[in-house]
């Protein structure tokens, strides 16, 4: 009798996972497996696997200049986005670290970009960067067609993305700063430490536990940028903003090369997985908690 | 400072002089502090205006007559402000429909995530069963798979099911999240197990325990997740772009960006639309900000 009750209880426990695991299974695990499967095939226009090519799609990718260019562009983009948006988040968090009148308004302003959609932001930046009516050219006194110039388009899209992501970084850093004990600053002041020393010796090490987490989240977030590319540059000019997610989208939905796009998806997944694992390893070795 | 440096001088001072000096130092300290405060305020003012400058500029354009925008002069602020752009935007773009769609989708996703995540987090924190760690790892591993990497297969799957251009295709795939489960679990683990055991002895079924005890106790985590999920769902772009085809089904972000290609004379109207579209997410964010920060960081980051 007792064992039957226990069995029932145990089965009951699994029921709590039915909603989440069903959704994960249908929209994450299954498509994940299907993506790998598709990446081994040539497909027809409807995305049906037609011809098994083994690693053919991958071989094509790794001999294609366009794919390496897309990877390079993605790395540059991620580097700009992560460094600029984390720096902006850190500076703004430091600015409101001490209490003063009006602090709530400022802290709302610093976190605000996280509430803005990439598409809405892209439409605003498009006007700002316009060569004839744009405010940026007017203020700088330049005559640059920012989004249609290979030299600037990527940087512009990256800075827009950095701005969008800075809000959540502000929140992460604020939380990190709040966790640092005030008393160590007072002690350092008594010992005659200046502000810069306090920042490098106390604040930065104090932030190290969340720094690791923030870097990972930022890299992953930056990799996933899509809306702003689609609206502002569509991968161009030349292929200068053809980030990997946009490249996947274009291959699948414009060129109908679902197999190749699936192979790129697998590469994207692998990169993010490796990044996450490396960070975990570094974290175990380097960061003190 | 002076007093410490010249102890003999201080010794020679009369009591009154000393008092005066003290007063003066206090005043100086006060003005120094005020200056520091002023500087802090000033720097913050400049930086915060810079951060929200694109929004302020969009607001300004939204009130600008179309003709004013097309000039070579510096035109930061509208000279003859007008609400015409907003009127036009509502008349020419099905903005209401877009916003309604987005609210419906984001609302359902938020509620769905709260339910599915609290159920899973409850079992992970309070129940003992075989394979608990495996299930937990499986859920956490989903965080490593970016949605963009599975989006093609997902698209092919749902189009095979004939789900394209429906509300369910916008909602159901997003009804759960590993981050939400993790966040709730972190919160639940701070409660003593005796809380659950006591309820169990009183004959309280699991579901009742979740609804009557856990959910009221974790309002801040739920609030945080609701704000975060709602904003992200409202701002979603890639998935709705792929799976919606007709104007009636479009969410705001897709609807508004489709207008991008219309003639340049209506730029001010489009920006007025953009302002209307941003407004709800900003409102949700500003109202829920406190919740968001308190809930997200009291549990998650401290770990």
Image (cartoon, coloured by chain):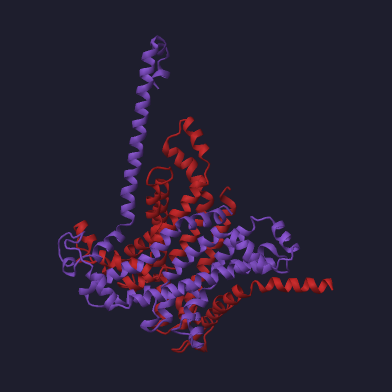
Outermost residue, right direction? A1
How many numbered marks appear?
0
Tell me, yes or no, if residue A174 can be seen here.
yes
Q: Which chain is purple?
A: B
Of residue A43 and residue B57, the one placed in the foreground of this image is B57
Asked if residue A129 can be seen in this view, the reply is: no
Name the image quarter holding residue B301.
bottom right
Q: Drawn colour of chain A?
A: red
Horizontally, is A227 left or right of A176 in the view? Answer: left
Residue A13 image offset from top left, x and y in percent: 70, 70
Which residue is at the front of the view, B158 or A221? B158
Q: Is residue B95 left or right of residue A7?
A: left
x then y, percent, for residue B239? 44, 76
Q: Is residue B28 above or below residue B95?
A: above
Q: Is residue A112 above or below residue B269?
A: above
Residue at 49% over, 37% down: A185
Q: Is residue B67 above or below residue A50?
A: above
Taking the spot 29% from the left edge, 75% from the top edge, the residue there is B90
Residue A48's spot in the image, x, y percent? Answer: 50, 88
**On the rendered image, what quadrant is the N terminus of chain B found in?**
top left
Which residue extends farthest top? Answer: B12
In the image, is B5 to the left or to the right of A14? left
Q: Is residue A63 left or right of residue B258?
A: right
Q: Residue at x 41, y 46 (%)?
A: A96
Q: Quadrant of the C terminus of chain B?
A: bottom right
Tell me residue A140's x, y (percent).
Answer: 21, 56
Q: Which of the 4 image quadrants contains residue A63?
A: bottom left
Q: Quadrant of residue B22?
A: top left
């Amino acid at each position: 009798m007792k064992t039957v009750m226990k069995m029932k209880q145990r089965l009951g426990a699994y029921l709590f996972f039915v909603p989440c695991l069903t959704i994960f299974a249908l929209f994450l695990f299954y498509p994940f497996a299907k993506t790998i499967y598709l990446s081994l095939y040539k497909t027809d226009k409807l995305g049906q696997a037609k011809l098994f090519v083994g690693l053919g799609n991958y071989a094509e990718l790794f001999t294609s200049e366009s794919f390496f260019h897309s990877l390079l562009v993605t790395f540059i983009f991620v580097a700009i986005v992560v460094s600029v948006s984390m720096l902006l988040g850190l500076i703004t968090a430091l600015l409101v670290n001490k209490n003063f009148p009006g602090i709530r308004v400022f802290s709302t302003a610093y976190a605000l970009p996280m509430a803005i959609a990439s598409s809405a932001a892209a439409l605003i930046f498009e006007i700002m960067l316009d060569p004839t009516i744009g405010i940026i050219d007017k203020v700088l006194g330049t005559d640059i067609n920012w989004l249609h110039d290979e030299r600037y388009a990527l940087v512009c899209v990256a800075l827009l993305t950095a701005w969008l992501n800075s809000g959540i970084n502000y929140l992460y850093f604020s939380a990190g700063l709040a966790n640092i004990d005030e008393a160590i600053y007072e002690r350092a002041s008594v010992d005659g430490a200046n502000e810069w020393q306090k920042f490098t010796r106390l604040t930065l090490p104090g932030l190290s536990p969340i720094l690791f987490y923030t870097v990972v989240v930022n890299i992953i977030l930056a990799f996933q940028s899509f809306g702003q590319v689609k609206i502002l540059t569509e991968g161009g000019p030349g292929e200068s903003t053809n980030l990997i997610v946009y490249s996947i989208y274009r291959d699948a939905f414009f060129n109908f090369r679902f197999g190749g796009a699936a192979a790129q998806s697998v590469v994207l997944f692998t990169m993010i997985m490796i990044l996450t694992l490396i960070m975990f390893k570094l974290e175990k070795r380097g960061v003190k908690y | 400072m002076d007093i410490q440096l010249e102890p003999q001088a201080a010794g020679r001072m009369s009591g009154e002089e000393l008092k005066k000096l003290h007063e003066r130092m206090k005043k100086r300290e006060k003005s120094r502090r005020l200056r520091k405060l002023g500087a802090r305020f000033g720097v913050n003012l400049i930086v915060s205006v810079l951060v929200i400058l694109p929004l302020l500029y969009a607001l300004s354009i939204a009130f600008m007559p179309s003709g004013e925008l097309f000039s070579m002069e510096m035109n930061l602020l509208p000279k003859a402000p007008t609400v015409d752009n907003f009127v036009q935007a509502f008349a020419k773009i099905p903005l209401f429909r877009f916003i309604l769609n987005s609210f419906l989708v984001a609302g359902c996703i938020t509620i769905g995530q709260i339910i599915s995540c609290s159920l899973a987090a409850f079992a992970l924190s309070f129940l003992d069963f075989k394979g608990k760690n495996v299930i937990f790892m499986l859920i956490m591993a989903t965080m490593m798979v970016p949605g963009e990497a599975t989006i093609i297969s997902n698209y092919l799957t749902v189009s095979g099911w004939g789900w394209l251009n429906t509300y369910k295709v916008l909602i159901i795939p997003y009804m759960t999240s590993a981050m939400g489960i993790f966040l709730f679990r972190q919160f639940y683990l701070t409660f003593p197990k005796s809380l659950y055991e006591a309820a169990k002895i009183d004959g309280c079924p699991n579901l009742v325990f979740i609804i009557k005890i856990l959910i009221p106790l974790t309002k801040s985590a739920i609030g945080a997740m609701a704000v975060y999920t709602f904003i992200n769902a409202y701002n979603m772009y890639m998935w709705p772009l792929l799976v919606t085809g007709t104007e009636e089904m479009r969410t705001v972000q897709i609807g508004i960006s489709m207008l991008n290609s219309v003639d340049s004379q209506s730029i001010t109207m489009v920006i007025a639309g953009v302002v209307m579209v941003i407004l709800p997410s900003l409102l949700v964010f500003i109202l829920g900000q406190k919740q968001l920060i308190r809930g997200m960081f009291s549990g998650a980051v401290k770990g």
